Amino acid sequence: MKQPFIGRFAPSPTGPLHAGSLVAALASYLDARWHDGAWLVRIEDIDEGRSVPGAAEGILELLDALGMHADGEIVWQSRRKHLYQAAAERILDNTYPCGCNRREIADSRLGFAPDGAAIYAGTCRHGLPPGREMRSLRVRVPETGLDEISFTDRFAGQVTQHLAHDSGDFLLKRADGFWAYQLAVVVDDAGQGVTDVVRGADLLDSTPRQIYLQHLLGVPTPRYLHVPVVRNDNGEKLSKQTGALAVTAGDESAAVAALVQSARFLDLDLDLAQAPPRSRDDFWQAAIPAWGRLLARRAAAWPTRLAAAAD
Ligand code: GLU
């Protein structure tokens, strides 16, 4: 029997979709279509402080205008807080209340995680110091030596992290009361039956923390594929903060131009015999098999042990 294949795109509605997020959307969509799988869209509006009103609707309209149609209902994280709460309760023994404020965390940090977050020194690990109140909830990672998490990324290859050194005890619930992205993403990927996560390489370093939470919750680990991050001329990741321009698809030629630009970034060989695609349909017809060729090219460059991941 054919194994189910479920991919997803999970934008945070912090602003309009820019060229960087379109690359992640395109790669996840092509991967699902190439594998005859389903493609889901989840709006990651769990961080309500950063969500911009109307941005999610704009992203959904744009995806439609580009010809990327989700299979199944759109899922909104802001409506799923009860599920994050229930998951946190299931792993309560592996968590602890933390009373440290931002300043204390910064002053005592053990270093920085690859994503720039301060590595928590574990001050509250053995109980809240007297007179302190809980501000946030943290996951206790295993002691050094038992903390290795490894996985094979379908693009990046083998990734290994030592949680104690590389992330420290990380947040499950933030001081502002919102559930942390790491928990929400794990609960949702499992709840939606996602088998294949395709997203930007800025999240490669978060993946071991997510795998650790999957182990604690007893849910499956999906396959992962992280695509390169689009940077501006200053080498910064495109984002609202770095002034990234919104993708527009006002008419068919603008839609095709945006798609072709993202496809080029992914190094897709569209095999168009020089003519640019005239319509979205032309684009998709060329791009889906081009994704298959890209996977085969990548697989050929890997040791045989990893080649199976691209099948
Ligand atoms: N919501 C995240 C973002 O927009 C993506 C999370 C994920 O794909 O796991 O950067």
Image (spheres, rainbow, N blue to C red):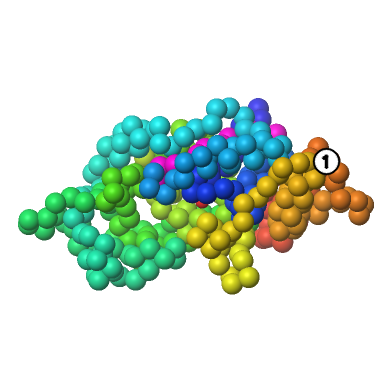
Q: Is residue 197 left or right of residue 91?
A: right
Decide whether residue 42 is among the magenta residues.
yes
Foreground residue, 174 or 62? 62
Foreground residue, 244 or 266? 244
Q: Residue at x 22, y 66 (%)?
A: 104
Q: Is residue 133 left or right of residue 108?
A: left
Q: Amino acid at mark 1?
A: Ser
Quadrant for the N terminus in the image: top right
Residue 51: x percent and y percent? 44, 45
Residue 247: x percent and y percent? 65, 50
Residue 178: x percent and y percent? 33, 44
Say above or below: 260 vs 230. Answer: above
Question: Which residues, given as a range, are shown in magenta?
Answer: 36-47
Say above or below: 225 vs 158. Answer: above
Q: Residue at x 58, y 27 (%)?
A: 72
Residue at the far left: name it.
130
The image quadrant of residue 77 is: top left
Q: What secondary structure is found at the residue carrying circle 1?
A: loop
Quadrant for the C terminus in the image: top right
